[in-house]
Image (spheres, helix red, strand yellow):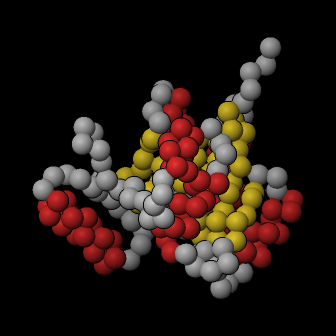
Amino acid sequence: METQKKHISVLTACYNEEENVAALIEAVAAVFNKMPQYTYEHLFIDNSSSDKTVTILREIAKTNKHVKVIVNARNFGHIRSPFHGLIQCKGDAVISLVADFQDPPEMIEQFLNKWEEGYKIVIGIKNKSKENPIMFAIRKTFYNLLSSVSGNDATIKNFTGFGLYDQKFISVLRDLDDPYPYFRGRGKNQK
């Protein structure tokens, strides 16, 4: 008797990523081609891009059964748009991955291995970045300040949302009545 393959949703929130989306689709496909034990979908949620991102995604989706596209009617911001995308994903696990290759697609396999070990959330921590060094330093300083002001190590430093989320966690998100959920913090008993 053949067992049912686990289905994985890869979520990519994007805004003006015409130069990256096709290459990202290929990179994600290459990862899953090495893991035939899974089926997958690659869901893009576009935050009202003003370039050709949507046109490119729609063209690819016509022939690539893995690619699905949600197009926002307006820009809902960098928190609400990806959050809406997360709760639309139906996979047994959801992997959040940005379009600009700041999150390496090859880590998907490591995330899935940890998930198979029983972890419900597996996150990627960014210790260095290809982004503007000044912006990276400002972001790092902000989260260090937030931790010191809060009186404990409440934030997960250098965490941008890149990670794997089990569908049980996604189900909890669907029940939240908060359009701006905070993902970068820790629970009290976590280390």
Q: Residue at x 48, y 53 (%)?
A: 176
Is residue 124 visible to the viewer in this orientation of the structure? Answer: yes
Task: In this rendered view, identify the residue nearer to me: 139 or 121.
Answer: 121
- Indicate the quadrant containing the N terminus: top left, top right, bottom left or bottom right: top right
Tell me: residue 174, above or below residue 60.
above
The answer to whether 154 appears left or right of 47 in the picture is: left
Q: Residue at x 27, y 55 (%)?
A: 155
Task: In this rendered view, identify the residue nearer to me: 123 or 24.
Answer: 123
Residue 32 position within the rendered picture, expressed as x and y whole percent measured from the top left: 68, 43
Q: Residue at x 55, y 63 (%)?
A: 82
Tell me: residue 151, above or below residue 34.
below
The answer to whether 185 appears left or right of 72 in the picture is: left
The answer to whether 139 appears left or right of 129 in the picture is: left
Tell me: residue 87, above or below residue 149.
above
Residue 7 position within the rendered picture, expressed as x and y whole percent measured from the top left: 69, 38
Is residue 19 visible to the viewer in this orientation of the structure? Answer: no
